Image: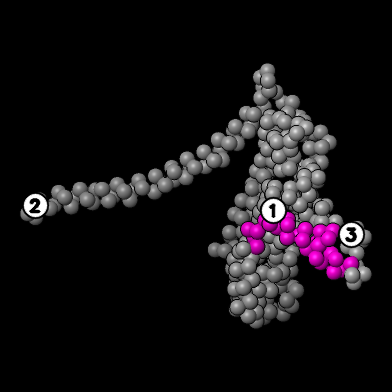
């Protein structure tokens, strides 16, 4: 009986070795199949559509991106994304630092972190409606401030502008920044601060000479991530401004479903232009993240 069990045990060991060796590659293959089906293949389809005309290959649709309307859309999108990312990095970074202070109550840290996890994903029509109800021309806060003698719209503020969109985007950019930066702040070693203090450095000198240089790659990576997050947003600006401000996502919607112009090739060209910007953003992000990883070792 022992002689009969030996071949069975050997077969089980061989099967276990086979599974242990090749099972991870099956998951890797499934991942790459998913990436190809939902990222690479759609991108290639957009490129083909953008370079295809009624009579064969053409660059006419890509060249239309240089027209004033679409050039303005790219400029507005870049300005809005840069401004909202800067606001998110500044205020989100300060909030993350305040939450992680040694004297900060633990329940406050948990409450802010939990709220940030929800607020970072709160966007689209509900967010637009919330800001219209609060800071619109007849919003609750607008009316209350007007009763106190502060006319926001009389002072030049408008929720339905680039500055208004920046303020709206800040609602989800700041919490996202807190979530992204918290691990980097926690990775700062206490020994570095103690060594700086022992050498006579003030808190300002510590952050200027040690803290910020160490955090700089992480801050840059977070800025790029927030930029990409704002650059690709569609539902919030469309619901808030009804497409009256030229942005790349809303222009894509206009050329694909508008009553005045209907052109799949132009929509594909705008998408390709957007992808090129996002590829540049992701390249910067990955380079910065790779450099930031050196400080976590």
Q: Which residue is mark 3?
A: 153
Residue 169 falls in image quadrant: bottom right
Query: Mark 1 or mark 3: which comes first in sequence?
Result: 1
Residue 125's label in the rendered image is 1
- Percent position of residue 2, x then y: 9, 55
Of badges 3 and 2, nearer the viewer stands 3
Query: Mark 2 or mark 1: which comes first in sequence?
Result: 2
Mark 2: give few (<14), some (14-19) or many (20+) Cα within 10 Å. Answer: few
What segment carries the magenta color? 119-146
Asked if residue 297 lies left or right of residue 51, the reply is: left
Q: Is residue 230 above or below residue 209?
A: above
**Callout 3–callout 2 Cβ contact below 8 Å:** no
Residue 184 falls in image quadrant: bottom right
Does residue 129 belong to the magenta stretch?
A: yes
Image quarter of the N terminus: bottom left
Mark 3: give few (<14), some (14-19) or many (20+) Cα within 10 Å. Answer: some
Query: Mark 3 or mark 2: which comes first in sequence?
Result: 2
Mark 1: give few (<14), some (14-19) or many (20+) Cα within 10 Å. Answer: some
Q: Which residue is mark 2?
A: 3
- Viewer-nearest residue: 150 or 85: 150
Residue 254 in sight from this viewpoint = yes
- Residue most extreme to the top: 55
- Viewer-nearest residue: 88 or 137: 137
Residue at screen point 81% across, 45% down: 244
**Callout 2–callout 1 Cβ contact below 8 Å:** no
Looking at the picture, the colour scheme in use is one colour
- Badge 3 marks a residue whose secondary structure is loop
Asked if residue 83 lies left or right of residue 182, the reply is: right
Does residue 153 belong to the magenta stretch?
A: no
Residue at screen point 90% across, 72% down: 148
């Amino acid at each position: 009986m022992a002689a009969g069990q030996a071949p069975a045990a050997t077969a089980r060991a061989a099967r276990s070795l086979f599974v242990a060796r090749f099972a991870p590659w099956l998951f890797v293959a499934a991942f790459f199949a998913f990436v190809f089906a939902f990222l690479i293949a759609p991108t290639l389809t957009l490129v083909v559509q953008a370079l295809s005309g009624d009579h064969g290959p053409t660059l006419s649709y890509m060249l239309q991106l240089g027209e004033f309307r679409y050039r303005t859309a790219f400029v507005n999108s870049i300005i809005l994304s840069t401004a909202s990312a800067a606001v998110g990095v500044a205020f989100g970074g300060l909030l993350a630092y305040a939450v992680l202070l040694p004297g900060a109550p633990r329940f406050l840290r948990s409450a802010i972190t939990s709220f940030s996890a929800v607020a970072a994903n709160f966007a689209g029509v509900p967010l637009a409606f919330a800001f219209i109800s609060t800071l619109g021309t007849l919003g609750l806060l607008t009316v209350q401030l007007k009763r106190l003698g502060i006319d926001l719209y009389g002072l030049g503020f408008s929720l339905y502008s680039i500055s208004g969109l920046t303020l709206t985007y800040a609602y989800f950019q700041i919490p996202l920044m807190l979530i992204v930066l918290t691990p980097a702040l926690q990775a700062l070693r206490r020994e570095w601060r103690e060594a700086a203090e022992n050498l006579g450095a003030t808190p300002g000198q510590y952050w200027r000479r040690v803290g910020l240089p160490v955090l700089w790659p992480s801050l840059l990576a977070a800025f790029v991530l927030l930029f990409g997050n704002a650059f690709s947003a569609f539902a919030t600006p469309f619901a808030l401004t009804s497409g009256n401000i030229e942005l790349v996502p809303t222009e894509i919607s206009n050329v694909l479903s508008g009553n005045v112009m209907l052109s799949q090739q132009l929509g594909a060209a705008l998408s390709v232009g957007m992808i090129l910007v996002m590829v540049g953003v992701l390249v910067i992000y990955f380079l910065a993240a790779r450099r930031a990883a050196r400080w976590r070792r």
